[in-house]
Image: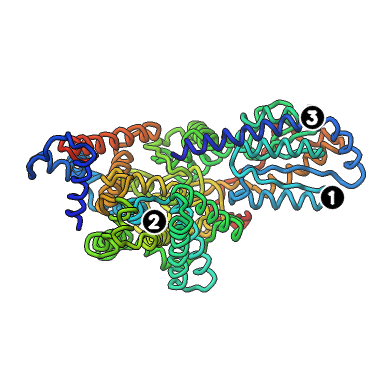
Amino acid sequence: MRSSLEETQTEAVVLDGPARRKPRPRRTIGDWLARYGLLTAFVVMLIVFLVTNEDFRSPNNLLNILQQSSIIGIVACGMAIMIIAGGFDLSVGAIGAAATMGAAAAMVGTGSIAVGVLVGLAIGLVAGIFNGLVISRLRITPFIATLGSASIISGIVFASTNAAPISGIPAGFTQFGLGKIGGFPIAGILFLSVAAVVFIMLKWTKIGHYIYAVGSSPEAARLAGVPVQTVILVAFAAGGLLAGLAGLVLLGQTSIGQSTAGSAWPLSAIAAVVVGGTPLRGGTGGVHSAVIGTLLLGVLQNALNLYGVSPYWQPAVTGVVVLLAVGVDSYHRKSVGGLA
Amino acid sequence: MNTAMRRRRLGFVGIAAALAVSLAACSSSGDAADTSAAGDSDGYDIGVLVFDTTVPYFTPMIQGEKDAAAELGVTLDIQNGQGDLAQEIAIVNQFVAQGKDAIVLTTSDGKGIVPALQAAHEAGIPVLANNTVIEDDKVITYVGSDNIRVGNTLAQGVCETVPADGKIAVILGVMGSSPQLDRLTGLEEGLAENCPGVTILDQQTANWDNAEALAVGQDFLNKFGPGSIDAIVGEGPEIQTPAQWAKENGRTDVKFIGVDIPKSVAPLVADGTIAAQVYQSPYEQGYWSIEDIVNWLNGDKDKVPTPFHYSENVVVTSNNIDTVEPY
């Protein structure tokens, strides 16, 4: 399905610009770089850090990076689905905070971790379905729809809790955010499992293929018999559910339900997906971008801390590395005649 | 994307605020006469602006204001600035237009709010700064904590906890914000004065965020192995997450010291997971701000400490955690 989509795109390019040069033969170095350029940049960066910094290469540190990246990683997996479907979600932070607060309140109230987890996931799912309905039925653009729902969700959380943080959740729940199985952080396992499930869904299921079709051209998808509204609903419901799950991991890591948490999630998750190589225009890309992008940003942040780079310089260094990585990737894509 | 949007919104609200200013300027002289009459008859009507009522620290502060108002028999009109300067300006103008007897301001921007206060000064409405210093010498006084003093007290906590040649790393708040800058200045000053042998190995920001503080704390603990660091010091309460993590991962060689005692931090101080925490009393601060403004309105101006009325900061450990009220 994916390759047939690529063919469709190539055709579209030819139609757009009939004077364009012929496609090159496959399997050239440029072709390979276009496909794996960003991964290469990431691996090079990783090797440099592994060789030059002994704190960085300690297994504990590498596992910490995975654990630290897992929250944004889970959000980014959901964001990748929504971006491929042609949208994005600015309310993931508010949904995450609402899930954190709801789960904390439920756990403190009932003393049951299971109830809290269900409440957190339910909040994420309901908020995601709300976004999906607003976008697909009312035809409000995702930017406005999710900006609005973020405000509504934050407002409801503030009003129902007086914005006071909720503490006193069962101690066992911190395992969810900080615990390890066989030395491997549970949060990291969760992140990679989510990525695997999303990968399977996008690659091998009908709904996954529909998501690419709708993101590529909703009108063409509709004409081809794809239930466009349902597909958008599913994409945003999945994004909301994963934001709720990320909220639970946050609660596990911090033990405190905080209504102001997650404010940086939407931009961080969108950045991770785009840095990882999935363009915002939709219809193309994959969940691998969410994983690579999140880990790249996580590794970079960790290395900057370990090298003791001044906090005043860190944003500038991060910006340069992101532009370099994405720039190299995008340059190679262009040079093989693909769409950047 | 966010900034552009915000700027546009600010622009729009700015226009609205400018309109409100001009309207307020037209009406303020007329209303001022009404106010003094009303104020004499049935208690004062005081406008209270809090820039963001969702900040947990402000919950007990507002409670202190309400309790003081109830005891002193005055009416409060508490408004939420929603963390937006333009909104705060609009509320100040509204207070002036309504002819409040006095205004108690907890602003997010002690410089940006100053032009808006001109109308209040012209109408003869006294303005008191609570929690955030306002850079306007016509403001009658400032009630609250001084972040440099908070930093000094934090240094005191560090000096009492680590050896004379101790080594620490610092987790900072939002870079460039005044609590971040002033607390760091106060910390450095206090260390130089009380325990000059203590060195700061590293400092990184966690933006007052629990999850970010956890990551920065983990990175510090990885970078500085057992024996090479004595304490991790935070500018805020978010020190709780790395403290908890260090305890669960056997890094009890490192002590944790931070600022503020919300309810989630109190048990960690009590069981020693956090060695010491600086306590500022938001309740006392709220109470004092109303008490001071009422004294001022009653003509007892000498009872109001000026230009600063600092609340007390204390170092709290497991020994004296029972003496403070977490929020």
The image position of residue A141, as x and y in percent, is: 44, 49
If you read the primary sequence from the N terminus, does the residue marked by circle 1 or circle 3 appear first?
Answer: 3
Mark 3: secondary structure: helix
Is residue B52 or residue B168 the one in the foreground? B52
Q: Are marks 1 and 3 on the same chain?
A: yes
The image position of residue A215, as x and y in percent, is: 32, 52
In the image, residue A266 sits, relative to residue B143, either above or below, namely below
- Say how the picture is coloured: rainbow
At label 2, which amino acid type do we have? Answer: Trp
Label 3 – label 2 distance at C-alpha = 59 Å
| Circles 1 and 3: CB atoms closer than 8 Å | no
Which residue carries the number 3 mark? B26
Q: Quadrant of residue A201?
A: bottom left
Picture residue at 60% right of the left edge, 49% below the top: B57
Q: Rate crowding at label 3 as few (under 14), some (14 to 19) or many (20 or more) other CA atoms within 10 Å.
A: few
At label 3, which amino acid type do we have? Answer: Cys
Label 1 – label 2 distance at C-alpha = 48 Å
Which residue carries the number 1 mark? B73
Which residue carries the number 2 mark? B245
Instruction: Give the position of the N terminus of chain A as an image quadrant.
Output: bottom left
Q: Nearer the viewer, mark 3 or mark 2?
A: 3
Q: Quick check: A138 left or right of B216?
A: right
Q: Quadrant of residue A301?
A: top left
Is residue B309 or residue A324 the one in the foreground? A324
Q: Quick check: B218 left or right of B271?
A: left
Is residue B57 or residue A333 the one in the foreground? A333
